[in-house]
Amino acid sequence: MKNIVFITPDDAQYGFSISGAVQYAVAPEEVEATLKKVMADPDSGVVVIDERLIKGVGEERFREMEKRWYGILIVLPAPEKGAEEGEEDYALRLIRRAIGYHVRLQL
């Protein structure tokens, strides 16, 4: 059975590990090394990374890693949406990539 692995910032240290899932609470500068380690583990099937940590990897590098990996890589939306002006939501980017054009969602 493959593992579900969560990579979160230090402030969410106990969020997922209490449920029995594998969790790494890392600093932004450790994200890429941790992601590589988890993706190299054959027992990892799904990796969930906190949206706030993607900046530590870089958007282009993250997409490249996502395309090359055999498992499922999911971005967990940040708990607080302090989105800066002009910053696009991850879910909207994912939808645009999947269907090929921008969709306006109104909740």
Image (spheres, rainbow, N blue to C red):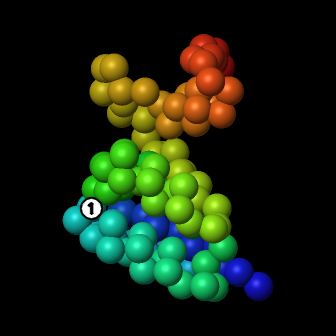
Q: Residue furthest front?
A: 68
Residue that appears at 71% across and 81% down: 2
Query: In which quarter of the view is residue 84 placed?
Result: top left
Q: Residues within 10 Å of mark 1 (few under 14, many from 20)?
A: some
The image shows residue 86 at horizontal and vertical percentages of: 33, 20
- In the image, taking residue 33 as reference, residue 105 lies left or right, namely right
- In the image, taking residue 85 as reference, residue 77 lies left or right, namely right
Q: Closest to the observer: 39 or 107?
A: 39
Residue that appears at 36% across and 46% down: 60
Screen quadrant of the N terminus: bottom right
Q: Residue furthest left?
A: 29
Screen quadrant of the C terminus: top right
Q: Closest to the observer: 98 or 78?
A: 98
The image shows residue 100 at horizontal and vertical percentages of: 62, 24
* Res 91 visible: no
The image shows residue 62 at horizontal and vertical percentages of: 41, 53
The image shows residue 48 at horizontal and vertical percentages of: 56, 62
* Res 103 visible: yes
- In the image, taking residue 50 as reference, residue 73 lies left or right, namely right
Residue that appears at 52% across and 31% down: 93
**75 vs 15: above or below:** above
Give the residue at mark 1: 28
Query: In which quarter of the view is residue 8 placed?
Result: bottom left
Residue that appears at 23% across and 65% down: 29
Q: Closest to the observer: 11 or 64?
A: 64
**9 vs 60: above or below:** below
Mark 1 falls on what kind of element? helix
Amino acid at pointer 1: Pro
**95 vs 74: above or below:** above
